[in-house]
Image (spheres, grey):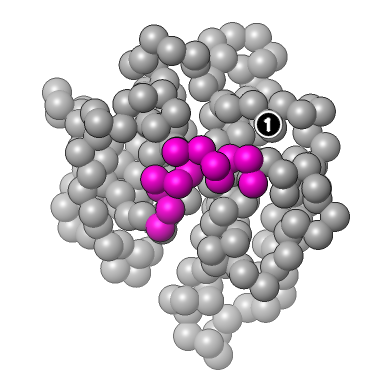
């Protein structure tokens, strides 16, 4: 199967990390694509009307997106420990954790587009400040999230690790570690894993 991807995308990284953690990275043929909201890739747009990465083309011609769907699909393909529990509150807590990690990525990517794509005179500082507040609020909730469950490897913690690393990459002046020892330790521990080392942009 073919994964349309670009190394700096935190959503792509989440999927690649899951593929590493579940021993399936070799199943993915990577197709590098350079696309932004203003410069969509024509081939990608034929597969995914939203023109976003990650997008997965299966060998039977089905196309899967977005990163949540692809992650769940890949998690269904292996016999090891599941990254998304099959049922119960564990499943929904993991999905909420993923929603927070993904939400941080979405917000940080939106700020990045505002800064990189919009002409400087039109950039809206108030909006960017409001978006940054969402990131801070999510980080504060994650800092105390379910007493230690972030240290485990699951779809939620993978998403959060990718989000934290993206903040380091795109917002180097934002010291999210300040006052957040749990998240600081979590990313340090995750960073030792092959799944993070091999997916560094
Ligand atoms: N909800 C999507 C978000 C994916 C996304 O926003 N990808 C960005 C790259 S980080 C993208 O392809 N942007 C191009 C665009 O917005 O047109 C997911 O989970 O996969």
Q: In the picture, residue 28 is in which quadrant? A: top left
- Residue at left 39%, top 45%? 198
Residue 120 placement, left or right of 21: right
Q: Nearer the viewer, residue 153 or 77?
A: 153
Quadrant of the frame with the C terminus: bottom left
User: Extreme bottom residue here?
Assistant: 121
Residue 119 placement, left or right of 33: right
Q: Is residue 190 magenta?
A: yes
Residue bearing the label numbered 1: 151
Q: What is the magenta range?
A: 188-201
**39 shown above or below 4:** below
Q: Position of residue 44 (x, y in %)?
A: 22, 50
Q: In the picture, residue 26 is in which quadrant? A: top left
Within 10 Å of disc 1 (Cα), the crowding (few <14, some 14-19, many 20+) is some
Residue 100 placement, left or right of 121: right
User: Extreme front residue here?
Assistant: 192
**145 shown above or below 51:** above
- Tell me, yes or no, if residue 49 can be seen here: no
**37 shown above or below 87:** below
- Residue at left 55%, top 90%? 121
């Amino acid at each position: 199967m073919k994964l349309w991807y670009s190394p700096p995308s935190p959503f792509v990284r989440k999927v690649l990390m899951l593929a590493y953690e579940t021993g399936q990275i070799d199943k993915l043929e990577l197709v590098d694509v350079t696309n932004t909201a203003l410069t969509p890739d024509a081939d990608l747009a034929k597969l995914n009307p939203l023109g976003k990465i990650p997008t997965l083309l299966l060998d039977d011609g089905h196309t899967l997106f977005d990163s949540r769907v692809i992650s769940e699909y890949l998690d269904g393909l292996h016999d090891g420990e599941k990254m998304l529990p099959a049922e119960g509150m564990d499943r929904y807590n993991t999905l909420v954790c993923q929603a927070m990690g993904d939400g941080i990525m979405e917000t940080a990517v939106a700020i990045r587009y505002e800064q990189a794509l919009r002409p400087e005179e039109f950039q809206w500082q108030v909006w960017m400040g409001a978006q940054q507040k969402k990131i801070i609020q999510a980080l504060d909730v994650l800092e105390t999230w379910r007493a230690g469950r972030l240290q485990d490897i699951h779809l939620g913690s993978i998403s959060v690790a990718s989000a934290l690393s993206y903040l380091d990459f795109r917002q180097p002046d934002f010291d999210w570690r300040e006052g957040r020892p749990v998240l600081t330790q979590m990313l340090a521990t995750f960073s030792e894993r092959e799944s993070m080392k091999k997916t560094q942009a």
